[in-house]
């Protein structure tokens, strides 16, 4: 099966394909899982509109990492406002030439991080704002969740070199991983869970092509765990 998929990859290499279904795909995972990289690669190959989280535009992010309790509510409100403005603009505008959307975050990411960073009282207030804003925002048709272990997350965070991320405690990443487990149990959107340590989407084009072929050929339901390329090839 893997050999057949690789022959498909050789024929398809460097040729753009399109879902042509107006799909909205959200890529999720912990800090350092590789969401943005995969989103960029998929959007290019699928000729989809790319939606990237504008974390650099949040003026409170560096302060949050140095003093979390002082800046948590402010940084989460700023992220929520930015994500709402971005998604409400893009998802309400149809594009004849790029009908599909690939994003490196799910709208519910705002609530997930807020549940970790805020006090219970702050989170209740935050949730009121979130529910009022995002009730009108379309949810994704498919989630691609990148599941990565702590050493992978720490290595990726270090290698990409964002100064304000270098001192993120491992305990914080582990807590986020637990919240993402709850997130996956809660969402009803079809989800593909990729085991990060088994894939190299940057160094191995075949892995990316297998994922693209699976997206084009299979209608996903529930949460599909994909532990490696062979399992992904079996879906093609």
Image (cartoon, rainbow, N blue to C red):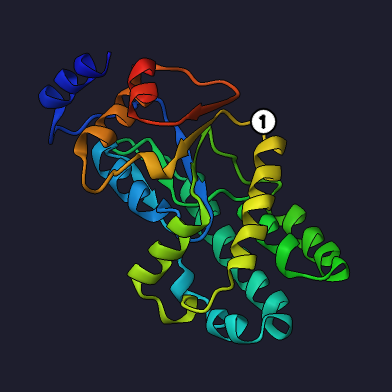
Q: Residue at x 67, y 46 (%)?
A: 136
Q: Quadrant of the C terminus?
A: top left
Q: Is residue 31 above or below residue 98?
A: below
Q: Residue 119's quadrant in the figure? A: bottom right
Q: Nearer the viewer, residue 56 or 145?
A: 145
Image-based side of 84 in relation to 35, left or right:
right
Q: Looking at the image, can residue 65 be seen?
A: yes
The image position of residue 18, as x and y in percent, is 28, 29
Q: Which residue is depicted at the point 51% across and 47% down? A: 28
Residue tagged by mark 1?
Answer: 188
Is disc 1 surrounded by few (<14), some (14 to 19) or many (20+) residues within 10 Å? few
Place of residue 180 in the rendered image (x, y in percent of width and height, measured from the top left): 64, 48
Camera sees residue 110: no
Q: Of residues 79 and 29, which is closer to you in this image?
A: 29
Residue 51 at x, y percent in the picture: 41, 53
**Quadrant that contains the N terminus:** top left
Towards the viewer: 34 or 48: 34
Q: Residue furthest right?
A: 121
Identify the element where label 1 is drawn: loop
Q: Is residue 159 above or below residue 135?
A: below
Residue 172, percent across and down? Answer: 63, 66
Residue 181 lies in what quarter of the image? top right
Residue at 72% across, 37% down: 186
Q: Residue at x 13, y 31 (%)?
A: 13
């Amino acid at each position: 099966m893997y050999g057949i998929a690789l022959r498909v990859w050789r024929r398809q290499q460097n040729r753009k394909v399109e879902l042509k279904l107006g799909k909205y795909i959200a890529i999720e995972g912990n800090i350092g899982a590789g969401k943005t990289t995969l989103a960029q690669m998929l959007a290019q190959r699928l000729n989809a509109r790319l939606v990237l989280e504008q974390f650099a535009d949040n003026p409170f992010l560096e302060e949050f990492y140095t003093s979390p309790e002082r800046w948590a509510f402010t940084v989460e409100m700023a992220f929520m406002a930015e994500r709402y403005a971005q998604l409400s603009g893009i998802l309400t505008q149809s594009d004849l030439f790029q009908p599909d959307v690939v994003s490196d975050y799910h709208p519910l990411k705002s609530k997930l991080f807020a549940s970790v960073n805020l006090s219970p009282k702050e989170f209740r207030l935050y949730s009121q704002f979130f529910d009022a804003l995002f009730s009108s925002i379309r949810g994704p048709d498919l989630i691609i969740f990148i599941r990565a272990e702590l050493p992978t997350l720490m290595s990726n965070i270090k290698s990409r070199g964002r100064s304000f991320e270098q001192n993120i405690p491992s305990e914080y990443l582990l807590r986020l991983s637990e919240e993402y487990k709850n997130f996956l149990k809660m969402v009803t959107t079809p989800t593909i869970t990729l085991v990060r340590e088994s894939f190299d989407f940057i160094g191995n084009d075949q892995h990316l092509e297998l994922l693209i072929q699976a997206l084009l050929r299979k209608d996903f339901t529930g949460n599909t765990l994909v532990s490696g390329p062979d399992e992904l090839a079996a879906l093609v």
